[in-house]
Image (cartoon, grey):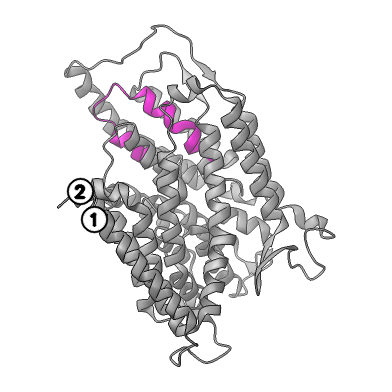
C-alpha cells in the first residue's frame, strides 16, 4: 500500500461526512430537540462532548503512533471531528441552529483568536537576538524572568513569541533542554499574564465587565510566590543537567566569541505595540457609542447571520493586527528571520487544530454556561479549582466568564461588576485558576501549543500530550495545592 493511502482514506471520510452534513441541512428539525425556549446547554446531553474528547485524544495519541501521517492530515482530523459534532447537531436541532453556532464560534471567537496569533507570530519572528548568549542556569533564569514580566504587558502570546526563539538559541548547544521549554510554558505562556487585562484573555473579559484595569495587580503576591517556587525547582533540575552536559564534553557553540548582544529587526517592536494597542482599543471603544455601540449596549457591525453581528471594533482590531503582520513581513530582512530559523509551519499547525477544538467544544461551553451555577460552588478554593480544571481543557476566557457570572449571582459584598457584586477573594480565585491552570495541558492556553510547535521545529524533543500533563501533574499541581492553603482557604 502506498504512503498516500491514509490521506486518501481521510479525504474520502471527509467527503462522505460533508455529504451527510448537506443531507442533514435539508432535513427539518427533529423531535428530540428539547422544548422551545430552553437554553442550548440544558438541551444538550453530556455525551455531546464526545467529538471534543475525540479531538483531544487525536492530538494526544495519533502523533505517538503515526507522526508522519499526523503532520500531513491535521486539517482533515479537525474537519472530521467537527463534522462528527455538526451532523448530529444539525439533524437534532435544525440547520438554522447549527449554522448559528458554527458561524458564531468561527466569526466571533476563532477568527479574532487566529488573527491575533498570526500577527504576533509574524512580528516576533522578525526579531532576532544576536550575540554570544549561552544557555547556562543563570542565563535561563534571567530569560524566564524577563518573559514572565513581559507577559502581563504584551500578553502571554506576545511574550512567548518574542522570547521562545532566544531561549532556544541560547540552549541550542545542549542535548537536554526539554525542561527549559516546559518551564517556559509554565511561566511565560501562562502565569506571567496575570497582572493586567492585557496579559491573558480571561482578565480582559473581566475588564470589559467592570473589573478595574489595575485590580488584577492583587494577584502579584500569588505570582511572586509561584515564580519563586518554580524557579527553585527549575534551578535544581537545570543545574544538574547543565553539569551533565559539561561532563559529557558539550560546550556552547558560539560562532563569534565575545560578540555583544544586539537585537536584529528591532523595529518590529513597534508592530508588537500596534497589536497590543489594537487589543486595548477594541475593548475601549464602548465610549464612542455613537458609532461602535447602540444606546442599548449592542455592538454595531456587519450582520453575518440572524442574531450574529461581527462588531466593528473587532474588525478594526483584526485589521490593525493584519496590517502590523504584513508590515513586519515586508520591512524585515529575510536574514533576520533566517537567524530565527523561522517558518510558517507552527502557526499553520495551530490554525488547523484549533478550528477543530473551537467547533467541537461548543457543547461543552454551552453545558458549562447553562449548568455552571448548579455546581454548588461557594468558597474561593472551589472556584479556583473548578475554573482551573476546566480552563486546562476548554478556552479559559469563556470558562472565566461563566464562573465570574456564577460568583456574581451569589450576591456577596465586594467589587461591583456588570455581572453583580463579587467578593475580592472569589474573583482572585477565579482569575488565578483561569490564568495559572491554563498551563496544565498543551491546549489550556493558545501560546502553549505554539511554543511546543516552534520548539519541535528547532529539534527539541518535546513531551507528548500526556507526557506534558505528567510534568504539570508532578510540578504544577503541588504548587496549586500550596496556593489553595496559603491564599484561598
Residue 6 is marked as 1
Mark 1 Cα within 10 Å, few/some/many (few <14, many 20+)?
Answer: some
Badge 1 element: helix
Left or right: residue 247 compared with residue 306: left
Residue at 53% across / 36% down in the picture? Answer: 122
Asked if labels 2 and 1 touch by Cβ distance under 8 angstroms, the answer is yes
Give the labeled residue for mark 2. 3
- The question of residue 353 being in magenta is answered with no
Q: Gap in Å between the C-alphas at discs 1 and 2?
A: 7 Å
Residue furthest to the left: 1
Left or right: residue 224 compared with residue 246: right
- The question of residue 167 being in magenta is answered with yes
Q: Residue 44, percent across and down?
A: 44, 81
Quadrant assignment for the C terminus: bottom left
Q: Which residues are magenta?
A: 158-183
Q: Main secondary structure of the magenta part?
A: helix
Badge 2 element: loop
Q: Residue 50, percent across and down?
A: 34, 72
Amino acid at each position: 500500500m502506498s504512503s498516500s493511502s491514509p490521506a486518501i482514506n481521510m479525504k474520502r471520510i471527509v467527503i462522505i461526512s460533508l455529504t451527510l452534513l448537506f443531507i442533514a441541512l435539508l432535513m427539518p428539525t427533529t423531535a428530540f430537540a428539547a422544548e422551545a425556549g430552553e437554553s442550548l446547554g440544558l438541551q444538550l446531553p453530556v455525551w455531546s462532548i464526545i467529538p471534543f474528547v475525540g479531538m483531544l485524544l487525536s492530538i494526544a495519541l495519533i502523533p505517538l503512533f503515526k507522526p508522519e501521517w499526523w503532520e500531513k492530515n491535521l486539517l482533515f482530523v479537525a474537519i472530521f471531528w467537527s463534522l462528527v459534532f455538526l451532523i448530529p447537531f444539525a439533524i437534532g436541532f435544525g440547520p438554522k441552529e447549527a449554522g448559528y453556532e458554527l458561524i458564531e464560534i468561527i466569526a466571533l471567537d476563532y477568527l479574532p483568536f487566529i488573527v491575533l496569533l498570526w500577527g504576533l507570530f509574524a512580528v516576533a519572528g522578525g526579531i532576532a537576538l544576536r550575540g554570544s548568549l549561552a544557555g547556562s542556569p543563570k542565563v535561563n533564569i534571567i530569560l524566564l524572568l524577563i518573559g514572565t514580566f513581559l507577559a502581563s504587558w504584551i500578553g502571554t502570546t506576545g511574550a512567548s513569541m518574542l522570547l521562545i526563539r532566544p531561549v532556544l538559541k541560547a540552549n541550542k548547544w545542549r542535548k537536554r533542554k526539554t525542561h527549559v521549554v516546559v518551564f517556559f510554558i509554565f511561566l511565560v505562556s501562562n502565569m506571567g499574564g496575570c497582572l493586567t487585562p492585557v496579559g491573558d484573555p480571561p482578565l480582559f473579559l473581566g475588564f470589559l465587565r467592570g473589573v478595574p484595569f489595575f485590580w488584577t495587580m492583587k494577584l502579584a503576591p500569588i505570582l511572586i510566590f509561584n515564580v519563586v517556587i518554580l524557579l527553585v525547582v527549575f534551578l535544581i533540575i537545570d543545574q544538574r543537567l547543565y553539569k551533565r552536559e559539561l561532563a559529557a564534553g558539550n560546550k556552547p557553540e558560539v560562532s563569534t566569541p565575545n560578540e555583544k548582544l544586539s537585537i536584529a529587526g528591532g523595529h518590529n517592536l513597534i508592530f508588537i505595540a500596534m497589536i497590543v494597542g489594537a487589543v486595548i482599543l477594541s475593548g475601549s471603544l464602548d465610549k464612542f457609542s455613537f458609532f461602535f455601540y447602540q444606546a442599548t449596549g449592542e455592538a454595531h457591525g456587519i450582520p453575518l447571520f440572524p442574531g450574529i453581528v461581527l462588531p466593528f471594533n473587532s474588525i478594526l482590531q483584526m485589521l490593525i493586527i493584519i496590517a502590523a503582520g504584513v508590515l513586519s513581513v515586508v520591512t524585515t530582512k529575510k536574514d533576520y528571520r533566517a537567524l530565527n530559523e523561522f517558518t510558517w509551519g507552527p502557526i499553520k499547525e495551530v490554525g488547523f487544530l484549533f478550528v477543530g477544538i473551537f467547533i467541537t467544544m461548543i457543547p461543552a461551553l454551552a453545558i458549562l454556561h447553562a449548568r455552571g451555577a448548579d455546581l454548588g460552588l461557594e468558597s474561593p478554593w472551589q472556584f479556583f479549582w473548578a475554573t482551573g480544571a476546566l480552563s486546562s481543557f476548554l478556552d479559559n476566557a469563556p470558562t472565566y466568564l461563566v464562573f465570574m457570572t456564577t460568583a456574581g449571582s451569589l450576591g456577596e459584598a465586594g467589587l461591583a461588576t456588570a455581572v453583580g457584586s463579587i467578593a475580592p477573594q472569589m474573583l482572585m480565585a477565579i482569575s488565578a485558576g483561569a490564568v495559572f491552570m491554563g498551563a496544565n495541558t498543551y491546549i489550556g492556553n493558545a501560546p502553549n501549543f505554539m511554543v511546543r510547535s516552534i520548539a519541535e521545529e528547532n529539534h527539541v524533543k518535546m513531551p507528548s500530550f500526556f507526557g506534558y500533563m505528567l510534568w504539570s501533574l508532578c510540578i504544577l499541581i503541588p504548587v496549586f495545592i500550596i496556593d489553595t492553603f496559603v491564599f484561598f482557604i
